Image (spheres, grey):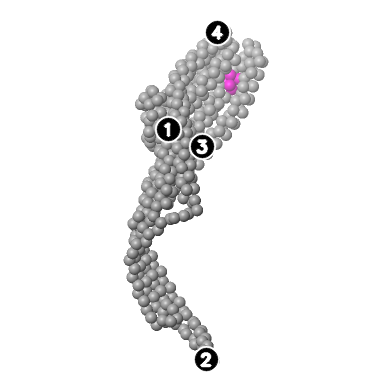
Amino acid sequence: MTLQHLARCSSLAALVLGAIACLAPAQAGAQGSGQIGLMQAWTAAFEHDSALRAARAASDVQRERLPQALARLRPSVSFSASANRNDIHRTQSGGGVSSSVDEHYGSQNYNLTLRQPLYRPSLLIDRAQADQVIAESQASLETEARNLAVRLTGAYLEALLAQDQQAFVQIQEKTLRTQLDAARAALQAGSGVRTDIDEIQARLDLNQAQALEAAQQIDSTRRQLSVMVQQPVTALQGLTGDQLRLPALQSMEVENWVRQALQHSPELKALEARRDAARLDIDKATASRKPTLDLVGQVVRSSSENVLTPASRYQNQILGLQFNLPIYTGGLIDSAVRQAHAELQRAEEALEGARRDLSVRVHREFRAYTEGERRILALQQALRSADQLVESNRRSMQAGSRTLIDVLNAQQQLAQVRRDLAQTRYVTALARLRLEMLVGEEPRDAIGQLGAAFSGT
């Protein structure tokens, strides 16, 4: 009678274990209309993320450097005018006679000036520098978009992991309560021991603490994701089953990925543009020693310019060349040239350091992804083995060679393997995305590819 009772309890535990096996797909299919996928999250974050919006504004700021540089090469026209009221009191003495005269009259002045630079090397360099500044800002914007892709995917996967952790804790709680009831029934029937009850109760108490932690983690991760997408997040699309379906890598040689990163990384493009702008700074500082030549045209109209000719009017038209040659600047130009050389060296060293760091990061993410794929396969095999271990312990307990604690330990091992497998899938997926971002892949394409794996399509 006792063995039959235990067998019924063990069958119930097996049903709970079956619920563990189908938990992830069941949740994925049961999500409500508030579910958000990775691609939807990316679309919302791309529009609302404050860091990316700031990068767009910074790019717009730098883009205005080009029309400003072009404007300095074009003619400039200015107009000035003045109108004055003159009140003059004049006293004159001579031959013992003193006379005073008061004069009141108005005077006007109009000046129209046209200036066209003919030879100004620094302005041409400003034009070339504007191109480099715009290129740097555009590359920085692309870098920020890729950083957003990594941040968003990391937050999304972290929220999924918290969701999986809560599911595992809930299943474990159901299993523990079922086993606790079975242990109490066995003790009442005279075939159990008090130690089994205490062991299960201790694990159940720990499970309650884990449940609180899991609930808090879900709230925290979903809140973080909500801030990024600027909308409530109540449900997430998850992976289908235990697979991570991503297209195979274009190359399995890490050096090919490094070369691609060095060629297409927007981070390096930004630093290269900064280096080229610094090199132009040297030419600009050197150009300060050269003369400048402007074409100047001027039309001046004036009336009542001075007290001697208060009723006269003048019109003066001028067209000529204005030449300027710096002779002595107190060492200013030499200092500017030295400063520009130092700035170029700093830009070159920063670029070289970024190249080396990029190579290290590509190696790290490539290894994380390829090793992650192998670890997923190993954990899938471990999952099958752990599932078989649970079944074996259950049957052995029915035969009397294993105890309820043995079944409990096997079930916890199965839950641990499932949790490790889920975490490994997420870490591997994030490593794949980081690798693609480092080599300059389009964030939308990479997110769409990864999102298809999560939607199960």
Residue 31 figure quarter: top left
- What kind of element bears circle 2? loop
Foreground mark, 4 or 3, reads 3
As measured in the structure, the alpha-carbon distance from the residue carrying label 2 to the one carrying label 1 is 97 Å
> In the rendered structure, which disc, 2 or 3, sits on the residue that comes first in sequence?
2
Residue 81 figure quarter: bottom left
Contact flag, marks 3 and 1 (Cβ < 8 Å): no
- Extreme residue toward the front, this view: 95
At 44% from the left edge and 32% from the top edge, which residue is drawn?
A: 355
At 47% from the left edge and 22% from the top edge, which residue is drawn?
A: 21
Where's residue 370, x and y in %? 43, 23
Contact flag, marks 2 and 1 (Cβ < 8 Å): no
- What kind of element bears circle 3? helix
- The amino acid type of the residue labelled 1 equals Leu
Residue with the mark numbered 1? 438
Foreground mark, 4 or 1, reads 1
Q: Which residues are magenta?
A: 176-180
Foreground mark, 2 or 3, reads 2
Residue with the mark numbered 3? 222
> In the rendered structure, which disc, 4 or 2, sits on the residue that comes first in sequence?
2
Residue with the mark numbered 2? 95
As measured in the structure, the alpha-carbon distance from the residue carrying label 4 to the one carrying label 3 is 47 Å
> In the rendered structure, which disc, 4 or 1, sits on the residue that comes first in sequence?
4
Foreground mark, 3 or 1, reads 1
Dominant SS of magenta comes to helix
- The amino acid type of the residue labelled 4 equals Ala
